[in-house]
Amino acid sequence: MRNQRSVKQEFLRKWITGLRRYSCDEKKNMSFLERKKAIKLSADIAMASTRDKTTRWSQALIANASSSGDTLTGSSKNNSSRSRKKMLMMRRRRPKVKSAKKEMSASCIAKRLVQKRTRKLKNLLPGGESIDEGCLVEETLDYIESLRAQIEVMRYLVTASQLIINPYP
Amino acid sequence: MLHCLNSNASGSEMTVLERQRATIKWQHNNNHHQGYSSSSSPSPSSSSSISLVQVQSSSPTCLAAGAWPKLDNNFLMGFTSSPSSGFPLPPPPPPTTSAASFDLNSAISRTSSCPLPSLAEGKETTTPNNKRKTDKFHNTKVVASDNDNKDKRVKVAAPNDSATVGKKGTQACGDNSNKDNSKVSEVQNQKPDYIHVRARRGQATDSHSLAERVRREKISERMKFLQDLVPGCNKITGKAGMLDEIINYVQSLQRQVEFLSMKLAAVNPRLDFNMDDLFTREVFPACAASFPAIEMSPNMANTASYLHFNSSQQIDAGINPQDISLRRTISAPVSAPETFLDSSCFTQTLPSSTWEGDFQNLYSVAFDQARAASFPSQLFTGLLEPSNLKMEMDM
């Protein structure tokens, strides 16, 4: 539990510094959607960097964010993320689908169901397309935990900001 | 915090032998203190426990049991990176932890060592763990070397009086390693590259199928962890159903993030988030994390009896997550005295730190559904005391 708390604190700190940088750079008023995108992106990157790039999803998140040319990410992240992305691409091995005949055995159907779902899960995870299934579950575990922490911190921030604006309802 | 991380980084470059020596020293100290219970007991069913274990084992400078609570906030973040960088896995935690939690610990430690080779390259020294190939024996090698280290450590510890500790350690780790396969034999010291798997009766002895079976069982083991994590997964037994639940859960979490970011964007017309207030808020949970027990005693001493009476009523209502209005009434006095005390000295702001810690604690109680029975009640008395003071001053 204590580790959770320190993770959340670090995430919050990084997120707020990222947002500060963003707001300092952008002098003009941003639209609602732009703001929302900035908030979400900075939150995601803060979460990913809190994991210290130890997991694939965090690396992929940072790589995607930096490749989209966002001003939030520093240049130091670009080099490592690009090399990591290349490595991820090289590792991608698409197994060839050999379904010539239609097999009606129960085990095959079950296998196909599971395969469909693992593919869906891989699409959900950032950078999940090129993970082998052994690490997939692990990555999912990690991702779920960090998402949870992120959501808690965000909720806290929302109510805190609401209280600032409206202290005595 | 930075220097701690740096020291961690330098400490993480210790060789395996140094780390083993450190673990032996740690075990000796543990024996002397006779305080397995005094050692920090990691929370059983969370992966944060693995980082606690590693902190205990691989920081030889902080061997005293009393130093551990301070370690948490500083060292844990640095050490969350260490599991997956391919270090030899730490010794098993003290035997007082239940077998299930220990299984979780080292199992997760094992599972978390599935990194890219690039991560391991720059950090490892010449150890058997360096022979890291990305084939299907990847994880098994880690397991093998893990067992290897444990064997070595047992042999060193045996001549000393900590033989019981060593035996228990091997037994526990043996149980854990046997969790995958009921007949996985212990790895020999001469061949750390292979794991010896004995085929069960009536099963194929092909090497491919054996490896396949090991892999499958590892996957199913991790699915069990996911079952604990994802709510509502306990009743479902099939792989496809569980994957369905997991997918739904991840999707819902991602949607929540989107929604909350939208809400934040709506609440703040600019992106500055009112730095002073938020900075104080973010600092205080850090204080509250380490100080709550200490602060509560003077507060408890000061509380009048009517406060206790009020607080007991408030606790039950406060823990209810749906009761937003009550949360507002609790938090509303929080913000006002906080601004009132903001410019005052640090000792006076400490009470507000407990509020913020309690505020966050409320959330963790509400959302994690983890309730320490007595602890929030004590925090609540601390919360209500200044609020009542404030009301008295108004009157």
Image: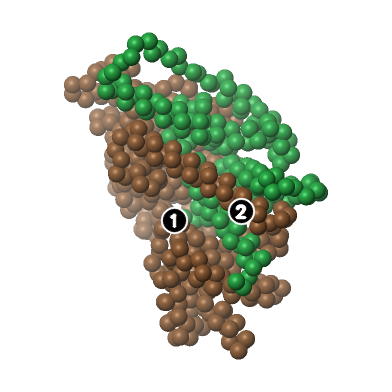
Chain colours: A green, B brown
Residue at image location 36% in from the left, 56% down from the top? B36
Label 2 marks which chain's residue? B
Element on which disc 2 rests: helix
Residue at image location 29% in from the left, 44% down from the top? B235
Seen from the viewer's position, the closer of residues B209 and B308 is B308
Q: Amino acid at mark 1?
A: Asp
Residue at image location 41% in from the left, 71% down from the top? B316
Seen from the viewer's position, the closer of residues B225 and B21 is B225
Q: In which quadrant will I find the C terminus of chain B? A: bottom right
Q: Quadrant of residue A111?
A: top left
With respect to residue B205, does B42 lie above or below?
below
| Residue B166 horizontal side relative to residue A66, left or right | left
Residue at the far left in the pictured view: B202
Residue at image location 41% in from the left, 58% down from the top? B369
Q: Amino acid at mark 2?
A: Lys
With respect to residue B316, does B264 lie above or below?
above
Label 1 marks which chain's residue? B
**Residue assigned mark 1:** B368
| Residue B330 horizontal side relative to residue B183, left or right | right
Q: Residues within 10 Å of mark 1 (few under 14, many from 20)?
A: few
Give the spatial CA distance, label 1 vs label 2. 22 Å
> Do tags 1 and 2 sit on the same chain?
yes
With respect to residue B371, does B113 lie above or below?
above
Residue B71 in sight in this render: no
**Residue assigned mark 2:** B263
Q: Quadrant of residue B153?
A: top left
Q: How many marks?
A: 2
